[in-house]
Image: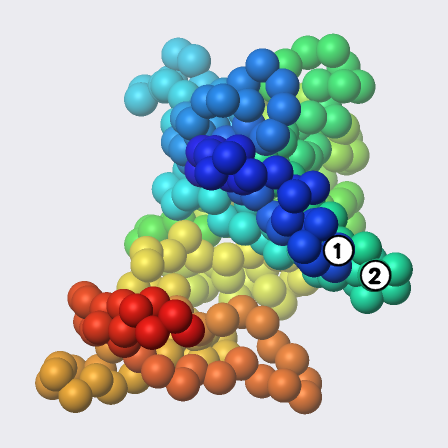
Amino acid sequence: KTGGLKKYGLDYASLAAINPRLVYCSITGFGQDGPDAHRAGYDYMIQAMGGLMSITGQPDGAPGAEPMKVGVAVVDLFTGLYASNAILAALWHARATGEGQHVDIALFDVQAAMLANQATNYFVSGKAPTRMGNAHPNLAPYQPFACSDGMVIIAVGNDGQFRALCGALGLEVEDRFATNALRVAEREALGPLIAAKTAGFTMQGLMQALEAAGVPCGPVNTIDQVFAEPQAIHRGLTVEQTRADLADPIRTVASPIRLSKTQVRYDAPPPRLGQDTDDVLGDLKSGD
């Protein structure tokens, strides 16, 4: 995530002189220009520098309060997706005009774009959003609630869903909670009222009641429970492949891309360490 073309003493213009249709993508921490262009960038530090950790974790004063990183390298993953989209756009331009271009993708830029509604909240209000734990800054109730055997996310996105939630839980629709704006303002009072009701349900019982009422909800799953979900099994989210040197199949996560005419194929299992080294070095030696 450092250097790019400049690391090798090259620039896009010199390469484009050889092939004007060339599309070249550089992925670095901070991009090809600016005061931080020379700096290395890694997901964790960019989550911090790009503001994501400042809105992730328990609020100040709560147990365990501190800025928190996300559990997977989301900046790296988002950067790859932005890069692939940008490359496809550049290839379409090259097809139409015969002109390639240099695609400059920076992890820091991507993290800023990922702030989404939180950045909008700041631009509109002038106030920097803070950590809110599992609460949503713009919606309520939109958080996990405890049941007798685990936790369920209740995601109320509009006033109609809130009325349906109250009906399913046997709660009165009070005037002070009638609109989302009121519920956001009164979230500290609203949360305990809902929690007192959900505590009497099992997870499955609560989800059945809410789904019947049209209220979006879902379990807080562990990783093993994710792949045991009936929907995950139906969609084939686990791929099993065999390898001659292993007794058990290798399990990986399926691609989420579903194409109606050109389905994703899994032609070979993940290779063992060094499996293709001789072939690669042989190709280099022969000049291929």
The quarter of the displayed image where residue 65 is located? top left
- Which corner quadrant holds the N terminus? top left
Residue placed at 31% from the left, 79% from the top?
A: 269
| Amino acid type for the residue under numbered disc 1 | Pro
Residues tagged 1 and 2 counted as in contact (Cβ below 8 A): yes
Mark 1 packing: few (<14 Cα in 10 Å), some, or many (20+)? some
Circle on res. 98? 2
For residue 138, side relative to residue 72 (left or right): right
Name the residue that disc number 1 marks.
20
| Amino acid type for the residue under numbered disc 2 | Gly
- Which corner quadrant holds the C terminus? bottom left
- Identify the secondary structure beneath mark 1: loop
In the image, residue 142 lies at what x, y percent? Answer: 59, 41
Judge whether 249 appears above or below 106 on screen: below
- Identify the secondary structure beneath mark 2: loop
Judge whether 122 appears above or below 148 on screen: above
Residue placed at 39% from the left, 70% from the top?
A: 287
> Which is more toward the observer, 160 or 200?
160
Circle on res. 63? none
